[in-house]
Each structure stands twice: as C-alpha cells, then as structure tokens.
C-alpha cells in the first residue's frame, strides 16, 4: 500500500505527547499544523506549520478554524493534546469562567498516565499528584503509540472507502 501524505492538526504540539506526535508525522513527510502558545518551541520543529493561539478563548478557536479552513483544503486528523490545568476558577479575557470541575466533553483516546510536560496553576495537592505522574507515567514515546495506531487505522479506513 502506498502512503499518502496527510494533514494532521495538533493542538498542544510543542510539548509532550503533542510534540512527539508532531515529530513522528513530520518524519513521515506529512503536513503538520501545530496550534499553541509558544512560537519559540514550535520553531524547534522544522517543517511544522504553527498557529499561535490561546484556546481558552472562544474567539481564538473560531479564528484558528477559519485559518485552517483557508490554508488547508482537507484535514485528515485533529489531535487535541493541549492541556493547561487549573486548580482554581479562572475567567478568560472574554469573561467566560472556566473551572476544573467542568465535564470533559470528548476524548479520542487516553493512553493512561504519561510523563509529559505539565503546565498549569496547581494547588499543593495537585502539584504533588503531577509530580507523581511525572515520576511514574509511561514515557511519551510509549504514550503516543496507541494514538498513532488509531490515526493510522482511521487513515487506512478512509483511503479504502475512497477507493470504492
């Protein structure tokens, strides 16, 4: 089977699992679009396309979607790896309150505890939990394997359905 280059969009692609996934797909020759907050970190991934954004803002989410739609005719996968944890209530610049007790709406795949970079504003109990995750979580390279397998399987399925 011949491989067709894909366009993969990864939020949080400058650190941890998102970065490892971005690197994997860049090495394969795919188009990788990273959405994140740190252009300097993105610059260390040659070939990646970077969109600077604060995804806590609804307006930024809309702008990012518009930019992706304008620049890329098709997106093969959207991989949400951005994670900024807060122990306390936070109000965005748009006046929207965010609180850590809110429900998670959708998870594509959760590989379990992974020792990755953690960013956030932690209370002491949460900071201790994060430290334990960093010590005992699986390496990032292991954590991305089930995600890559899922994305690759989806791509094979989509290619087969287009051949019919």
Image (tube, rainbow, N blue to C red):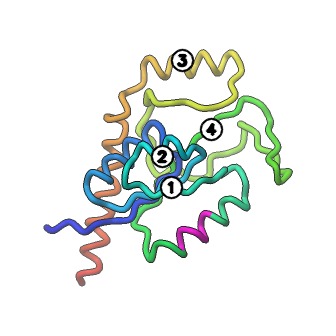
- The answer to which of marks 3 and 4 sits earlier in the sequence is 4
> Which residue extends farthest bottom?
164
**68 drawn magenta:** yes
Mark identifier at residue 163 = none
- In this view, the residue in front, 100 or 65, is 65
The residue pinned by badge 3 equals 131
Marks 1 and 3 close (CB-CB < 8 Å): no
Q: Residue 1 in the image: x percent, y percent?
A: 13, 67
- The answer to which of marks 2 and 3 sits earlier in the sequence is 2
Q: Residue 131 in the image: x percent, y percent?
A: 54, 17
Mark identifier at residue 50 = 1
Q: Residue 31 in the image: x percent, y percent?
A: 36, 62
Mark identifier at residue 42 = 2
For mark 2, give the secondary structure: helix
- Name the front one of labels 2 and 3: 2
- The answer to which of marks 2 and 4 sits earlier in the sequence is 2
Marks 2 and 1 close (CB-CB < 8 Å): yes
For mark 4, give the secondary structure: loop
Q: Is residue 107 above or below residue 125?
A: below
The residue pinned by badge 4 equals 84
Q: Residue at x 79, y 39 (%)?
A: 90
- The answer to which of marks 1 and 3 sits earlier in the sequence is 1
């Amino acid at each position: 089977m011949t491989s067709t280059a894909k366009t993969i969009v990864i939020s949080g692609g400058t650190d941890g699992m998102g970065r490892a996934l971005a690197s994997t797909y860049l090495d394969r020759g795919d188009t990788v679009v990273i959405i994140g907050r740190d252009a300097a970190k993105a610059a260390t991934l040659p070939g990646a396309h970077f969109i600077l954004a604060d995804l806590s803002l609804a307006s930024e989410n809309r702008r990012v979607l518009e930019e992706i739609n304008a620049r890329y005719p098709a997106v093969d996968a959207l991989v949400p790896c951005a994670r900024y944890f807060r122990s306390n209530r936070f109000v965005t610049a748009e006046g929207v309150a965010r609180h850590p007790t809110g429900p998670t709406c959708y998870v594509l795949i959760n590989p379990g505890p992974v020792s990755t970079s953690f960013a956030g504003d932690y209370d002491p109990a949460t900071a201790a939990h994060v430290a334990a995750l960093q010590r005992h979580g699986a390496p990032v390279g292991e954590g991305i394997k089930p995600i890559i397998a899922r994305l690759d399987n989806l791509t094979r399925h989509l290619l087969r359905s287009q051949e019919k």
